[in-house]
Image (cartoon, rainbow, N blue to C red):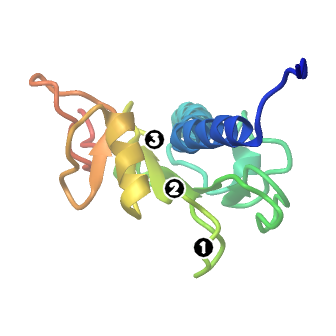
């Protein structure tokens, strides 16, 4: 009588196959959750920049295009472009956003966080999108640059479909749909 107990090779292979299938199903959701956290970090940074720019506008009657002029400049930020990860001067060796400041007039002051690979190389990123925040607005807009980026933007805005050239805003209007991605109008 054979008293050896254990699993057969077939049973072990079936278990490994099941674990592989479950992991393959879970990985896309994991990557999406990681990207959402990156997006939240960028939205917070854009909000802080917009508030600092509003304070700057009250002081000198125009916005600044240099991070050093802001009272909440990120560490290492110099000039009008800042990279959140990697080398702060060019974004190399990083996996973050290129955040830029532009415009000095009230209605065109804007901060942009771009999540794309450097230059024309877009092979390294699964999600490509741009977040935009006008200094005079409370809304952040999201524009998907590829299919995954558009899906992430739809989640960000809470809408089922993107309008206005693959763009949406996290501001909600009265019927619960994302507001248009338009430039703010100066209130008198």
Residue 60 lies in what quarter of the image? top right
Give the side of residue 161 with respect to residue 143, left or right.
left
Residue drawn at x 37%, y 60% as measured from the top left = 147
Q: Which type of secondary structure does the marked residue at label 2 adopt? A: loop
Which residue appears farthest toward the bottom when viewing the image?
A: 120
Residue 119 visible: yes
Q: Which type of secondary structure does the marked residue at label 1 adopt? A: loop
Tell which circle, 3 or 1, labels the residue nearer the N-terminal end.
Answer: 1
Residue 138: x, y in percent? Answer: 39, 30
- Name the residue nearer the viewer: 175 or 11: 11
Residue 123 is marked as 1
Give the side of residue 118 with respect to residue 139, left or right.
right
Give the side of residue 76 with respect to residue 24, left or right.
right
Give the side of residue 89 with respect to residue 124, left or right.
right
Q: Nearer the viewer, mark 2 or mark 3?
A: 2
Whole-angstrom CA distance, mark 1 to mark 2, is 10 Å
Q: Are marks 1 and 2 in contact (CB under 8 Å)?
A: no
Callout 2: 10 Å neighbours few (<14), some, many (20+)? many
Q: Which type of secondary structure does the marked residue at label 3 adopt? A: loop
Position of the N terminus by quadrant: top right
In this rendering, is residue 129 above or below 160?
below
Tell which circle, 2 or 3, labels the residue nearer the N-terminal end.
Answer: 2
Position of the C terminus by quadrant: top left
Q: Name the residue tied to disc 2.
A: 127
Residue 135 is marked as 3
Whole-angstrom CA distance, mark 2 to mark 3, is 25 Å
């Amino acid at each position: 009588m054979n008293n050896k107990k254990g699993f057969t090779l077939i049973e072990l292979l079936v278990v490994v196959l099941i674990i592989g299938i479950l992991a393959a199903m879970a990985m896309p959701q994991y990557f999406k959750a990681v990207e959402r956290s990156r997006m939240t970090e960028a939205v917070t940074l854009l909000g802080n920049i917009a508030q600092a720019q509003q304070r700057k506008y009250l002081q000198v009657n125009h916005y600044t295009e240099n991070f050093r002029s802001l009272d909440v400049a990120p560490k290492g930020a110099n000039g009008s472009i800042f990279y959140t990860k990697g080398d702060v001067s060019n974004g190399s060796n990083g996996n973050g956003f290129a955040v830029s400041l532009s415009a000095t007039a009230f209605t065109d002051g804007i901060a942009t966080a771009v999540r794309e690979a450097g230059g024309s190389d877009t092979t390294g990123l699964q999600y490509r999108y741009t977040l935009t925040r006008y200094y005079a607005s409370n809304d952040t807009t999201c524009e998907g640059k590829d299919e995954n980026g558009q899906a992430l933007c739809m989640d960000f805005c809470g809408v089922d479909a993107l309008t206005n050239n693959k763009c949406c805003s996290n501001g909600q209007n009265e019927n619960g749909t994302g507001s248009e991605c338009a430039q703010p109008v100066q209130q008198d």
